[in-house]
Structure formats: C-alpha cells, structure tokens
Image (tube, grey):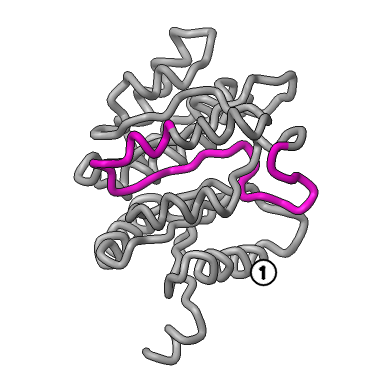
C-alpha cells in the first residue's frame, strides 16, 4: 500500500469488500497496510469514478460519499484518513512503513503480532501481493511482497487471513485457482474464497470456526457488488469428494 493510492477506484472496492466481510464492524479486523513510500508512478490516479455517482455510488453510498468528500477537500492523500474516518468500524491498524531490510521487517511483524489478541480477521495490503521467486526475502523491493511464512504465522495464531494480490502474467482463472490451492496446501485448509475485481484479486483463508460466517458474508459481497467483485470458493480435491 502507498498513500498515493488512497481513494482510487481499487480502494473503493477494497474498503467495500472489507466493510461487507466484517459486517460493518461485527467482527474486528486488523489492517496491516504494509505501507511503502510513494513513487513517481501514476498508480492511484483513477479517481474519476467519484464524478459518476449514478454508476458507482449505489454499491456503498456512505463509503462513496466519504471518499468523494475527502478528495474534494484534501490535496495530500494519506492512509491516516482511512484510519480516522470511521469507514472501517471496529478496525485496528498497523501503520508503520515497511522497508526491505530483513531485520526491520522482522520487527515490523513482531509489532503486528502484538495487535492480534482481540482480532478475528487480518487484512494484508502489500503493493504487489504474495512472494515471487525473483524477490527473495530482504532483497530490493521485497517490501512490496508478503511472504508465505508471514501468512502462516498469523493463520496459526488463530486468525482468518485476507490478502490483496495483483494478477500475474498468466491466465487469470488459472492463476487464481493455482494460488488458492497453494493457500490450502500451505495453511492446511480445505477451502479458500477469492474476490476478483477487474484489476486485482483478494484471497480469504478462514479459520474453521469462521467458515460459515465468511460463506454468508461472501454471499453478501456478491449481492452488494455484483460484477465489480466476483466471488468464488476454491476447494481442495479431498473436500470436493466429501460433497
């Protein structure tokens, strides 16, 4: 996550997804921003949706109004606004900047684990998504990625996990299925839910006691967001044979 992305079209979908999954604060969420410094790229420029309220506002009217008012008033975009606006009720935030250094990264995640006692769901918001082979832990630009051991540590601490993920250069359906099953394998879960948007996908690995709850909330996402967020349940072969 970068401050320059705040309130763009992907942010609107992202916060809408989080609000619906958490049932507007019914469960407590920790937002791990994985914040990295702004750069000179044009990412985050897609805010014209806020000029088309007839097309976009109905998905989440109060969220839309909040983001529209913010961009009309403020020139500088910051995650601090999201944290203080109330659009993610009953959420806590890990807001430190993440760097590439392995020692700094280790302490960053120690800080995250100190926040988890009363939390049900952890949302990881890396710039690019899960680790790739060409970006080893601690190397340049590794701060843009989330590493599997970090996901596993949080899941094994008893928390459900939601991860932001860019698409890669392969067929999107194939990519989603492959990564969903890797979640199942690495976390020893029987199913993972994906939330596909036009540009990115989110993966949710639920704790067993949360399966029913998140299945219900996922249906609510489908009903509320339609084609903007497409929901799919990915099951292991063993789980499919049981049905």
Q: Is residue 178 above or below residue 136?
A: below
Image quadrant holding the N terminus, namely top right
Query: Outermost residue toward the right?
Result: 134
Image location (x, y in percent) of residue 17: 39, 46
Depth order, front residue of 133/241 = 133
Q: Is residue 152 above or below residue 26?
A: below
Q: Residue at x 60, y 48 (%)?
A: 147
Query: Outermost residue toward the left?
Result: 26
| Residue 118 visible, this angle | yes
Image location (x, y in percent) of residue 159: 34, 52
* Residue bounds of the magenta highlight: 111-138
The part of the image, by quadrant, that contains residue 61 is: top left
Magenta segment main secondary structure: loop
Image location (x, y in percent) of residue 202: 51, 52
Q: Residues within 10 Å of mark 1 (few under 14, many from 20)?
A: few
* Magenta stretch holds residue 130: yes
Identify the residue position indicated by label 1 in the image: 174
Q: Residue at x 35, y 24 (%)?
A: 65
Looking at the rendered structure, the secondary structure element under dot 1 is helix
The part of the image, by quadrant, that contains residue 46 is: top right
* Magenta stretch holds residue 157: no
């Amino acid at each position: 996550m970068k401050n320059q992305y705040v309130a763009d079209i992907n942010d609107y979908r992202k916060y809408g997804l989080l609000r619906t999954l958490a049932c507007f604060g019914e469960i407590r969420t920790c937002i791990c921003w994985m914040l990295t410094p702004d750069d000179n790229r044009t990412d985050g420029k897609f805010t014209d949706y806020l000029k088309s309220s007839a097309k976009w506002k109905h998905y989440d009217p109060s969220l839309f109004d909040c983001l529209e008012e913010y961009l009309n008033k403020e020139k500088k975009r910051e995650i601090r606004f999201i944290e203080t606006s109330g659009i993610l009720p009953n959420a806590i935030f890990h807001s430190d900047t993440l760097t590439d250094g392995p020692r700094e990264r280790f302490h960053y995640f120690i800080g995250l684990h100190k926040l988890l006692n009363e939390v049900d769901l952890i949302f990881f918001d890396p710039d690019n998504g899960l680790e790739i082979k060409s970006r080893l832990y601690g190397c340049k630009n590794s701060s843009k990625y989330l590493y599997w051991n970090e996901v596993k540590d949080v899941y094994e601490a008893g928390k459900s996990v939601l991860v932001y993920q860019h698409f890669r250069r392969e067929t999107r359906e194939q990519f989603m299925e492959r990564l969903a099953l890797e979640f199942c394998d690495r976390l020893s879960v029987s199913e993972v839910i994906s939330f596909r948007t036009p540009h990115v996908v989110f993966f949710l690995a639920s704790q067993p006691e949360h399966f029913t709850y998140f299945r219900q909330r996922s249906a609510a996402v489908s009903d509320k967001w339609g084609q903007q967020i497409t929901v799919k349940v990915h099951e292991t072969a063993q789980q499919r044979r049981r049905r």
